[in-house]
Image (tube, grey):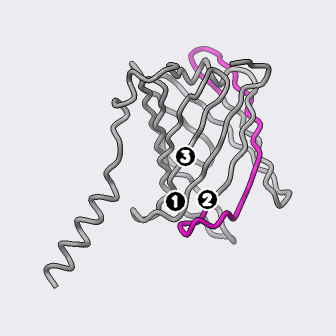
Amino acid sequence: MKRIITALLAMLLAACAGPDIQQYKTATPQLDPAEYFTGTTDAWGMFQKRSGEVTKRFHVEITGTQQEGVLTLDERFRYDDGTTEQRIWRLTRDGEGRWRGTAGDVKGTALGETAGNALRWQYTLLLPVDGTTYEMQFDDWMFLIDRCTMINRASMRKFGIELGQVTLTFRRRACSP
């Protein structure tokens, strides 16, 4: 029994481990979220269950504006089943390479950190499913590929167990690499 508990604890600790954002500090192009998201950006994405099955696909139109040190991202989602959703983020710089953000369906404050071409964004999303709202922990990793294109991979967890992943590709409008 002791071996089983030790093995379970080791697996839990391994699940919490991940790359350090600073390992990307020399990667280019440098990502500045305020610069990248100001204007209109389109994103195409999908949600995959832990098994790998794709259960939702979507398009997001993001309008980014800056005013008095606040970057506002108005995200408008259109899912493959025809449903729509809107999320409005309000992001502020919190020191060198650090960001804080709030949105109506995010519990508390989201925390982000940039280094080189990467942004790690962590938050708890209040996710409604069949009349019940679940608190899902998101661990988003965004990587700027060129000044127009960014790729995002997010892990969605509940009680430390990964339930699925969200993958997005962002493309700034009226942009050429």
Q: Does the magenta segment cover residue 57?
A: yes
Which three-letter amino acid code belongs to the residue tagged 2? Answer: Leu
User: Which quarter shows the N terminus?
Assistant: bottom left
The spot of residue 43 in percent (x, y) is 72, 39
Whether the residues at callouts 2 and 1 have beta carbons within 8 Å, the answer is: yes
Point out which mark residue 82 bears: none
Q: Earlier in the sequence, mark 2 or mark 3?
A: 2
Which three-letter amino acid code belongs to the residue tagged 3? Answer: Arg
Is 133 placed left or right of 74 in the picture?
Answer: left
Question: Mark 3 sits on what residue?
Answer: 153
Distance (Cα) linking label 1 and label 3: 19 Å
Whether the residues at callouts 2 and 3 have beta carbons within 8 Å, the answer is: no
Question: Mark 2 sits on what residue?
Answer: 127
Q: Nearer the viewer, mark 2 or mark 3?
A: 3
Residue sitting at the far right:
82
The spot of residue 155 in percent (x, y) is 50, 53
| Pick the front one: 129 or 154 | 154
Question: Mark 1 sits on what residue?
Answer: 135
